[in-house]
């Protein structure tokens, strides 16, 4: 007895007919043409009672009455039947703007002159702007000096330090040097005194220059300084001397004056380098204060 497969009535692989599901039966001739050549099937025709009417613009609300038409297309206006609005509802009429006068044509020579002037201004701006920016940066880093006049023989106090200056003409410090009548040696003696603890940490060397009434400036070089390098050794109320030398023309030797610019640096005991750098950036104090010792 042959057992049927569990998957339905399909024959198993060992049955006489184990072909595909869509294979023709065995008794069908192989040369039979089974192609359908009849007319294509048509959908069933369902009759719709009544006639279809094109849908127009219908008014939804408020509901139209039975007497009026349901279309909302406006009727054409009838001449002579327009009703004017009251005056307070009308928009104000704007006066017609007159047409601008015709533009005059510029001559070729004037046009070239304007183009040339514009090119010159552009070049001038391109050259001047970088210079102006550099000058502003210089002014921020080195602002204009504030001059403090000190009368002859008197001392000046600035930032917890007292300053006093003396100036005298001296012979050439090198005895073997050849005489030179075009220059005169000058000796500057600066005396500094710390007035409190803040003054002791401001022990750095000041900038000293010589000047005359016309504004010319000569540099004075330091040759000796007795100010201690450590703020702990700088005693309050003790004067320390700084010796400087410079050269000026003999014609102004009896009228030159001393310009002294105190240093704004502070040597705080125990302060780290990082804190010192931060203080130098955040401080509002500027090196723009100059003491002028007159004669």
Image (cartoon, rainbow, N blue to C red):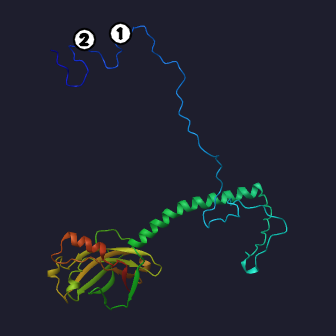
Q: Quadrant of residue 174?
A: bottom left
> In the figure, residue 188 lies in which quadrant?
bottom left
Q: Which mark is residue 61?
A: none
Drawn side of residue 127 relative to residue 291, left or right: right
Image quarter of the C terminus? bottom left
**Visible in this render: residue 295?**
no
Residue at 47 percent across and 16 percent down: it is: 35
Name the foreground residue: 126 vs 159.
126
Query: Is residue 46 depicted above or below 222 in this figure?
Result: above
Q: Please provide percent x and percent y for residue 247.
A: 36, 74
In what element is the residue under mark 2? loop
Between the C-alphas of marks 2 and 1, the distance is 13 Å
Q: Residue at x 49, y 67 (%)?
A: 132
Q: Earlier in the sequence, mark 2 or mark 1?
A: 2
Q: Nearer the viewer, residue 165 or 227?
A: 227
On the image, the x and y values in percent for residue 80 come to: 85, 68
Helix or strand or loop: what does disc 1 sit on? loop
In the image, residue 131 above or below residue 241: above
Residue at numbered disc 1: 27
- Label 2–label 1 contact, CB within 8 A: no
Where does the N terminus fall, quadrant-wise?
top left
> Is disc 1 surrounded by few (<14), some (14 to 19) or many (20+) residues within 10 Å?
few
- Report which residue position mark 2 lands on: 16
In the rendered image, residue 162, in percent from the top left (x then y), is placed at: 27, 88
Closest to the observer: 264 or 165?
264
Residue at 54% across, 30% down: 42
Q: 87 or 247, which lies in front?
A: 87
Query: x and y percent of residue 24 in the render?
Result: 36, 14
Q: In which quarter of the view is residue 69 placed?
A: bottom right
């Amino acid at each position: 007895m042959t057992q049927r497969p569990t998957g339905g009535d399909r024959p198993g692989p060992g049955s006489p007919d184990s072909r595909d599901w869509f294979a023709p039966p065995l008794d069908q001739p192989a040369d039979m043409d089974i192609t359908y050549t009849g007319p294509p099937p048509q959908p069933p025709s369902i009759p719709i009672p009544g006639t279809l009417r094109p849908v127009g613009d219908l008014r939804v609300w408020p509901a139209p009455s039975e007497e009026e038409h349901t279309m909302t297309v406006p009727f054409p206006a009838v001449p002579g039947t327009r009703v004017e609005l009251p005056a307070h509802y009308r928009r104000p009429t704007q006066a017609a703007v007159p047409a601008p006068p015709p533009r005059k044509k510029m001559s070729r020579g004037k046009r070239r002159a304007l183009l040339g002037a514009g090119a010159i201004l552009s070049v001038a701006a391109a050259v001047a702007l970088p210079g102006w920016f550099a000058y502003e940066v210089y002014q921020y880093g080195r602002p204009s000096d504030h001059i403090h006049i000190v009368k002859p023989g008197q001392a000046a106090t600035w930032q917890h330090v007292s300053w006093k200056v003396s100036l005298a003409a001296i012979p050439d410090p090198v005895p073997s040097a050849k005489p030179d009548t075009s220059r005169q040696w000058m000796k500057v003696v600066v005396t500094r005194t710390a007035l409190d603890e803040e003054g002791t940490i401001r022990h750095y060397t000041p900038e000293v220059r010589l000047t005359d009434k016309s504004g010319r400036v000569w540099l004075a070089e330091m040759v000796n300084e007795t100010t201690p390098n450590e703020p702990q050794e700088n005693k309050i109320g003790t004067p320390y001397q700084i010796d400087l030398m410079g050269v000026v023309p003999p014609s102004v030797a009896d009228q030159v004056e001393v310009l002294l610019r105190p240093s704004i640096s502070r040597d705080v005991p125990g302060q780290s380098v990082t804190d010192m750098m931060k203080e130098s950036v955040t401080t509002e104090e500027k090196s723009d204060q100059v003491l002028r010792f007159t004669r």
